[in-house]
Image (cartoon, rainbow, N blue to C red):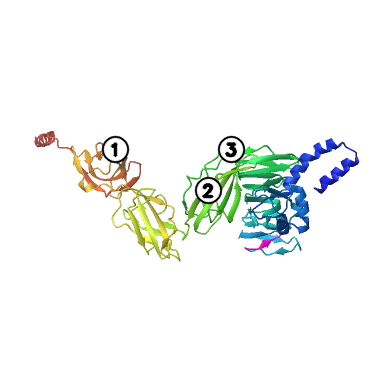
Amino acid sequence: MKQMQTLFSYLISRRMPAMLLLCFFLPLYSSVAAAEEWIYTVRPGDDLWSLSKKYLISIRLWEKVQKINRITDPIHMTPGTKLRFPLELLKSGASVARITHINGRVSMSSGDSGDILPVKKGMLLWEKDTIRTGPDSSVNLEFSDGSIIQLQSNSSLLLEVLRSYGDTGITDTRIKLLRGRTRNRVIPRSGSGHRFEITTPSATAAVRGTEYRIGVSENQSSRVEVLKGRVDLGSRGKNRKLPGGFGSVAYRDKPPLAPVKLLPAPPLDGLPSTLTQLPPTLTLPPLGKARGYRVQLARERSFTTLIHDGITSSTALTLPTLADGTYYLRVRAIDHHGIEGMESLRSFTLNARPFPPKALQPAPAAVSTSYRPVLKWSGQPEAEAYLIELADNGDFHDPLVHIRTTATSYTPVQPLKPGRYYWRTAAIESGRPGPFSTGLWFRCPPSAPDLALGTLVEDNTLFSWRPGEKNEHYRVQVAADPDFTDIIRDEKTIAPRYSLEKIGYGEFYIRVAAISSDNLEGPFSLPRKLLLTAPFNPWVPSLVALAALLIMI
């Protein structure tokens, strides 16, 4: 207002025509006056003297209000009449901001002394105070009108102006964000005179009631993202009106960008609801236009206190090591302007403790030499017992074994059939089981055929045995000795039989190993002794007799 009066005096001194002065100043004065007035609605029983005593710096100023509003009868005013009170005439005083939530490293410096003071919940901040946050830290400030600012990690802001105007309910809040980011919820106010502004090195964001975010980058550019309501973003003489769902960027040397539609919220429905590993890891579904993602964690759905706040360019998220419990994840995509989009919220439970035991035996992907293999795992000092699961599928659906034991080993009661098996363990502490270890698998090979039940047929030229599992094939070895150091034949056959033709005659040994449909070879059977003799020839006795007769002659 004083600057406008100075300019008016200067133009008068230059003898500018009155009509031109009127055209120049009338719109300007109207906008300034609207911004610096409080509008009061007259109620039954009001008179100008009692209103002046209640709201004005001095009751003697009632005549100014009478002139401004052209009141003819200051005692009998019509209820519903709108009265204009200039803010400069109203009682005013210092307002405060109260710290409602703190997480991590937060400090403040007093505007009076510059001293660094300890910060605690419930502390009051005054005009000219500065507050700062460190990595993965946050602080919430509540102002006298109920508006809330959350100062997020690695941020700093100055409370430039905190004023209130008596009992009018009007507040003047002006904040300077020096670096970092804030999330703001400004309480809507009806009428004129209210002001809530956040300035940055490159812009000013003015609101009447809305929910929005504002951040300052290292190059001093500012980014505003409006979630609800509207924000007026001004910079370099240009003003942008940003509705909900839009954002903009203001640079120090150019006007703000035209409103940019915020990227949609990333879909998080497919993420697991329970995590069991440390550090926790998640994979986000990619969002086409995203150049990165902001990831935030909190213990409450309202995100009143942030426990993690970071940016990643990858959809593979590695979260910080956390205590077991329920958490809330908030994710938003970042576009090529650096503007952060709408956000998704998802809860998850971390159940990583007590840590699962380490598997010792059998080794991963081992072939068991026993159909009752011994499963062993490492003991946990804090564990009171263990859960053991054994299944024939990697999902552990309907496991063959699910038991609680205080031992650190387990042997199946019944022999396992040939095939692949999966097993895992979990520690139990204070009656609560922790997460299972990663499922490991081993194989039980096909059992060896029982050659004692085998038969020699077709004049000792074919040896057969009972078939095993479906689609099994076989490896056959024939040797001249029971130790199979002198192997004559080593061949595979599909059918449960083997031709002994062209081996010769005499004493031999045969053994057979079954091979599963996925080519896992089992152990060899016990050797079977075979005595292969030449087939009977009726001409042989006749020839022998003839030879004997010839010799006698």
In which image quadrant can residue 455 be found? top left
Image coordinates for residue 252, horizontal then vertical, percent: 75, 43
- Main SS, magenta residues: loop
Q: Which residues are magenta?
A: 121-126
The disc labelled 3 sits on which kind of residue? Lys
Residue 124, magenta (yes or no): yes
Q: Is residue 544 left or right of residue 377?
A: left
Mark 3–mark 2 Cα distance, whole angstroms, equals: 20 Å
The disc labelled 2 sits on which kind of residue? Leu
Image coordinates for residue 271, horizontal then vertical, percent: 48, 47
| Mark before the other along the chain sequence, 3 or 2 | 3
Image coordinates for residue 550, horizontal then vertical, percent: 11, 34
Q: Nearer the viewer, residue 261 or 292?
A: 261
Q: Which residue is mark 1?
A: 494
> Is any atom of residue 159 visible in this view?
no
> Is any atom of residue 100 visible in this view?
yes
Q: Nearer the viewer, residue 316 or 66?
A: 66
Residue 345: image tag? 2
Residue 289: image tag? 3
Between tags 2 and 1, which lies in front?
2
Q: Is residue 52 left or right of residue 406?
A: right
